[in-house]
Amino acid sequence: VIAFNYESTSLWDNVKSSATPSVYNAKATQSQSGGKWVVGSNNYWPGASKKVSFFAYAPFSDNNSGIALSAQAATGAPVITYTVPSTAADQSDLLVATALDQDGSGTSSPSLQFSHALCGVKFAVGSMEGITNITKIIISGVNNKGTLEIGGATWNVESSTSNYTIDKTSNPISVSGISDQDITSGDDLLFLM
């Protein structure tokens, strides 16, 4: 969670170019099963004379998972720099959310509606006749690094690309006389920009 507070007479769009966060990359944890999510450190509402804008992403990163957050001293909405891990099993869905211009009195908790920032790619077989074993799926030339402003809708991708392989050589997927069957799931699901 990243939070910015500013005068209640202002709006986020008017202050974002000079705003720096009052809460930076604080990890939220669920208080109990099905309970509210809370930020672990002692953070306090700034009071009724202020507004607060919240930005969040998941999964949490301490810069070791391919997700890097813009510096704490940076102004404006936080920016995620993301490098897609090379194997599907190491990839995870990236979610982002914002709650802008919230009342600083803390009388209500902000509602963060998360949305998917990556594209989940799975593969399916249309109509197959005969016996076929699929041993490998390769996607080539996919952009593998980019930046996304939390709350923005567009990735700014770098020119670097990677190939992504789902290797089933040791456990081929047998498709015989089937149609419309998913052939990838779980650790074989790719999350790409």
Image (cartoon, rainbow, N blue to C red):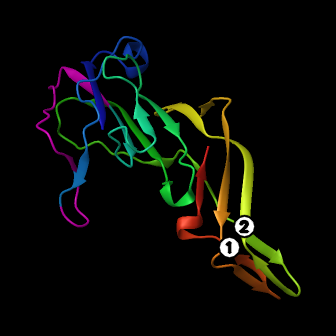
- As displayed, is residue 179 above or below residue 74? below
Residue tagged 1: 169
Q: Residues within 10 Å of mark 2 (few under 14, many from 20)?
A: few
38 falls in the magenta region: yes
Amino acid type assigned to the residue bearing label 2 in the image = Lys
Q: Position of residue 43 (x, y in %)?
A: 14, 34
Q: Nearer the viewer, mark 1 or mark 2?
A: 1
The C terminus lies in which quarter of the figure?
Answer: top right
Earlier-in-chain disc, 1 versus 2: 2
- As displayed, is residue 110 above or below residue 48? below
Q: Is residue 89 left or right of residue 173?
A: left
Contact between marks 1 and 2 (CB within 8 A): the answer is: yes
Outermost right residue: 129
In the image shown, does 72 or 188 lie closer to the viewer? Answer: 188
Residue tagged 2: 136
In the image shown, does 13 or 146 lie closer to the viewer? Answer: 146
